[in-house]
Image (cartoon, rainbow, N blue to C red):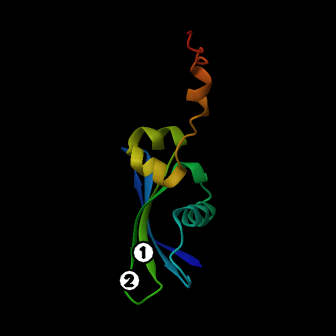
Amino acid sequence: MKVDITDKRENSILQRQEITFTVKEAGTTPSRKELREKIAALLGADEKSLVVDVLKTGYGTTQVSGKARVYKSEKELRRLETKPMVERNLGRPEKKKAEEEMPAAKPAKK
């Protein structure tokens, strides 16, 4: 899989870079995680502060084009992106904390 960055713009208002890329020589459509790893390696950015937004595949071809956004920090990413987009790219948060905070249920008395 070969990733080429076709356009890179700095958005100083939202403190992020907006990237347009194409993927060539891919046998199958790559996952968001694979694309985040490759783009982060190309840009020298942290993988957790990068979001792959749009993926477009052409009918009958293996070429994929898309858009990604690179933030200054993960905190900024979580503040500006929608919850479904964050979950799609970074995964859902674990529910262990909520289970630990709940007190143990008391057995019912007869």
Which percent across, then down, holds residue 39? 56, 64
The vertical placement of 2 against 79, above or below, is: below
What residue sits 63% from the left and 63% below the top? 41
Which percent across, then down, holds residue 103? 59, 17
Q: Could you say which quadrant of the image residue 13 lies in?
A: top left
The vertical placement of 26 against 77, above or below, is: below
What residue sits 40% from the left and 90% below the top? 60
Q: Are marks 2 and 1 in contact (CB under 8 Å)?
A: no
Badge count: 2
What residue sits 56% from the left and 35% below the top? 95
The vertical placement of 5 against 90, above or below, is: below
Residue type at numbered disc 2? Gly
User: Upstream in the sequence, badge 2 or badge 1?
Assistant: 2
Closer to us: 78 or 99: 99
Q: Report the side of 10 relative to 39 (left or right).
A: left
What residue sits 56% from the left and 9% below the top? 109
Counting other residues with Cα less than 10 Å from the Cα at mark 1, is it few (<14), some (14-19), or many (20 or more)? some
Q: Which mark is residue 23?
A: none
Residue at far top of view: 109
SS at mark 1 in the image: strand
Residue type at numbered disc 1? Ser
Q: Give the Cα distance between marks 2 and 1.
A: 9 Å
The label nearer to you, 2 versus 1, is 2
Q: Quadrant of the N terminus?
A: bottom right
Which percent across, then down, holds residue 83? 40, 44
Closer to us: 104 or 76: 104
On the image, numbered disc 1 is attached to which residue?
A: 65
SS at mark 2 in the image: loop
Q: Which mark is residue 58?
A: 2
Counting other residues with Cα less than 10 Å from the Cα at mark 2, is it few (<14), some (14-19), or many (20 or more)? few
